[in-house]
Image (tube, helix red, strand yellow):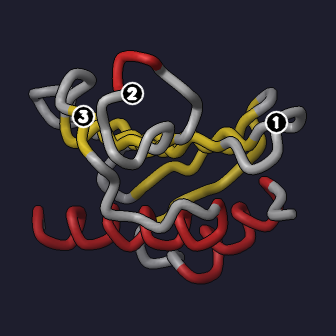
């Protein structure tokens, strides 16, 4: 099973070009980014393979991107349910373009973040 420490190590090593710091903050991993934004990572200790990756940018629009698989009945119409992706806004939800497994989903989400940051420069 993938742990939050595994994800911290990947963020610090594989994504060192966009990650300023990665540290445990209460029950989550907080990753600070070169764009002044941050990513909060939750991996459930009680429910196997349940996760949430939440990127909050510091742009004027308050853009957020969140990929998670916690069941939210609001998104039960998606073919990928319970997996869903908030693409830029809390209410703009779609089928995620990321793998559904924690480790590969995290790496793919971080690649997405990296590409968005690089394009904005």
Secondary structure beneath label 1:
loop
Residue placed most toward the observer, 86 or 59: 86
Of badges 2 and 3, the one in the foreground is: 2
Which residue lies under the disc numbered 3?
93
Q: Position of residue 44 (x, y in %)?
A: 78, 37
10 Å neighbourhood of mark 1: few (<14), some, or many (≥20)?
A: few
Residue 47 marker: 1
In this view, the residue farthest toward the bottom is 14
Q: Position of residue 55 (x, y in %)?
A: 40, 43
How far apart marks 1 and 3 lie (CA) works out to: 23 Å
Q: Residue at x 35, y 36 (%)?
A: 56
Q: Residue at x 64, y 80 (%)?
A: 13
User: Looking at the image, is mark 1 or mark 3 earlier in the sequence?
Assistant: 1
Q: Residue at x 39, y 27 (%)?
A: 76
Q: Residue at x 81, y 63 (%)?
A: 2
Residue 77 marker: none
Q: Are marks 2 and 1 in contact (CB under 8 Å)?
A: no
How far apart marks 2 and 3 lie (CA) works out to: 11 Å
Residue 119 sits above or below residue 4 on the image? below
Residue 119 sits above or below residue 113 on the image? below
Secondary structure beneath label 2:
loop
Residue placed most toward the observer, 14 or 92: 92
10 Å neighbourhood of mark 2: few (<14), some, or many (≥20)?
A: few
How far apart marks 2 and 1 lie (CA) works out to: 19 Å
User: Looking at the image, is mark 2 or mark 3 earlier in the sequence?
Assistant: 2
Q: Are marks 2 and 3 in contact (CB under 8 Å)?
A: no
Quadrant assignment for the N terminus: bottom right
Which residue lies under the disc numbered 2?
76
Q: Position of residue 74 (x, y in %)?
A: 36, 17
């Amino acid at each position: 099973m993938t742990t939050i420490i595994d994800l911290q190590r990947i963020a610090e090593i594989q994504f060192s070009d966009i990650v300023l710091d990665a540290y445990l903050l209460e029950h989550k991993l907080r990753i600070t980014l070169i764009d002044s934004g941050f990513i909060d990572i939750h991996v459930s200790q009680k429910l196997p393979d349940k996760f949430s990756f939440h990127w909050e940018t510091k742009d004027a629009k308050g853009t957020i991107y969140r990929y998670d698989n916690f069941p939210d009945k609001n998104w039960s119409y998606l073919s990928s349910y319970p997996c869903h992706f908030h693409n830029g806004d809390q209410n703009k939800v779609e089928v995620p373009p990321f793998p559904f497994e924690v480790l590969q989903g995290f790496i793919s989400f971080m690649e997405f973040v990296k590409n968005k940051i690089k394009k904005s420069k």
